Image: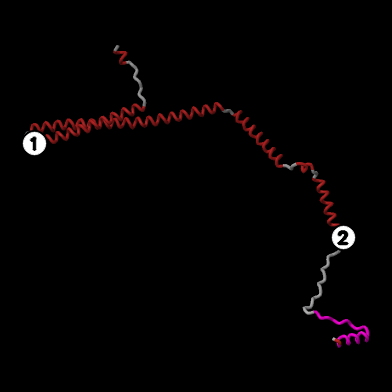
Amino acid sequence: MFKKLFNKPQKIPSALSTFDKLHETLEMLEKKEHVLQKKVAVEIQRAKDFTRSKHKRAAIQCLKRKKLYEAQIEQIGNFQLRVHNQIVMLEGVKATTETVDALRTAASAMKTINLSINVDDIDKTMEEMNEHNESMKHMQEVLAGPIGATADIDEDELEAELEELEEEELGGQLLQPPNREPALPPPIASHPRREKPQATSDADELAELQSEMAL
């Protein structure tokens, strides 16, 4: 029966529960240290009181108890140091474990990805991409080409028609007379005079003279 009790497998505590337990222990030790420090202060005060009342033996007993309390305080300080050391080590172990788990997860993910992809699939995918690119390029070229009847026009015919137009234009220029500068009109007098017509005979002159005299 005792063999079964002592050989009973113990449950391994989790990191979180261990942290909680260590912090609880540390808090308990701090409280106990505080109580012992109060007891030390009390014993010192009592030793002073006995010394003033000339009770030397009682004062010595108070100092002995003070020494015991101080020894316990020192021991508790060592306990606290050990607990702190365990907390630091456990934090380091926890960080190491989490890092290893993350690396293990990443390695497993990479393995899964490598198993799901092979070189043949990559080559096939690249070929399909190239085919799609060529098809798209062809579609763009078709869309960018001429529309309607313009695509059926022969370029040679256009060249021949253009040459005929140039020959007609050249022939028309040769038939036109050379350009001459137009003669400038004579200057217009600001006060034009009324010139008398030249008499053709003496009778005309006489008739004109009489007409002026009558005026």
Amino acid at dot 1: Thr
Amino acid at dot 2: Leu
Residue holding disc 1 = 51
Residue 75 image position (x, y, % from top left): 23, 30
Q: CA distance from mark 1 to mark 2?
A: 152 Å
How many other residues sit within 10 Å of disc 1, few (<14), some (14-19) or many (≥20)? some
Residue holding disc 2 = 175
Image quadrant assignment for residue 65: top left
Q: Residue at x 20, y 30 (%)?
A: 72
Image quadrant assignment for residue 45: top left
How many other residues sit within 10 Å of disc 2, few (<14), some (14-19) or many (≥20)? few
The circle drawn on residue 167 is none
**Residue 141, above or below 206:** above
Position of residue 162 in the picture relative to residue 69 (left or right): right
The residue tagged with tag 2: helix, strand or loop?
A: helix
Residue 185 image position (x, y, % from top left): 81, 73
The residue tagged with tag 1: helix, strand or loop?
A: helix
For the residue pair 14 and 64, the one nearer the viewer reads as 14
For the residue pair 136 and 148, the one nearer the viewer reads as 148
Image quadrant assignment for residue 81: top left
Task: Please report the bounds of the magenta region as a residue range.
Answer: 192-213
